[in-house]
Image (tube, grey):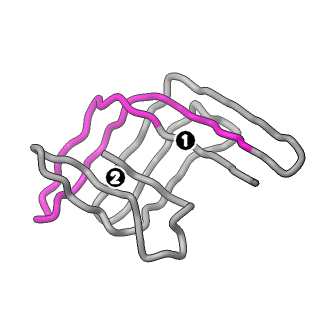
């Protein structure tokens, strides 16, 4: 699974897809991300017509580099995905216990 958000907002493209039984299924909609940036280890939810997923984090990594005009900040969490994803034919597939990660990054240069 690959899901992204924010940086493609306002564009017609997304980077969202799921591989089910060896077949890639493009998810073209922009997804809603719900998480609390004051609590990185809280649940991260991704919602859309074809996606209902929650990541339960167990680890958080933070980095920041801020010098003059260059800023690189990131918060990355690792955890377990649960929920479901719909394929191109409209069939739902359960996701339960898939290890993965997600992140929020900020770049300025």
x%, y% of residue 76?
57, 34
Give the CA separation, mark 2 to mark 1.
Answer: 18 Å
Task: Out of 77 and 39, give the one closest to the viewer.
Answer: 77
How crowded is the residue under tag 2: few (<14 C-alpha within 10 Å), some, or many (20+)? some
- Measured along the vertical axis of the image, is residue 35 above or below residue 98? below
The residue mark sitting in front, 2 or 1, is 1
Task: Out of 62 and 82, give the one closest to the viewer.
Answer: 62
Task: Out of 87 and 11, give the one closest to the viewer.
Answer: 11
Task: Residue at 37%, 62% (x, y): give it.
Answer: 48
Residue 73 sits inside the magenta stretch: yes
Q: Which mark is residue 53?
A: none
Task: Residue at 39%, 58% (x, y): give it.
Answer: 15
Magenta residue span: 72-101
Task: Out of 7 and 53, give the one closest to the viewer.
Answer: 7
SS state under label 1 = strand
| Mark 2 lies on residue | 52
Q: What is the quadrant of residue 6 in the picture? A: bottom right
Placement of the N terminus among the 4 image quadrants: top left
| Mark 1 lies on residue | 103
Please tell me which of labels 2 and 1 falls first in the chain.
2
Residue 68 sits inside the magenta stretch: no
Placement of the C terminus among the 4 image quadrants: bottom right
Task: Residue at 49%, 40% (x, y): give it.
Answer: 102
SS state under label 2 = strand
Q: What is the quadrant of residue 55 in the picture? A: top left
């Amino acid at each position: 699974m690959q899901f992204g958000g924010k940086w493609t907002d306002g564009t017609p493209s997304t980077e969202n897809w799921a591989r089910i039984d060896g077949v890639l299924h493009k998810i073209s909609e922009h997804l809603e991300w719900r998480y609390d940036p004051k609590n990185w280890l809280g649940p991260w939810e991704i919602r859309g017509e074809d996606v209902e997923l929650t990541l339960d984090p167990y680890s958080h990594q933070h980095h920041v580099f801020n010098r003059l005009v260059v800023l690189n900040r990131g918060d990355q969490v690792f955890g377990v995905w649960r929920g479901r994803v719909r394929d191109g034919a409209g069939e739902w597939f359960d996701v339960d216990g898939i290890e993965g990660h997600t992140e929020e990054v900020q770049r300025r240069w």
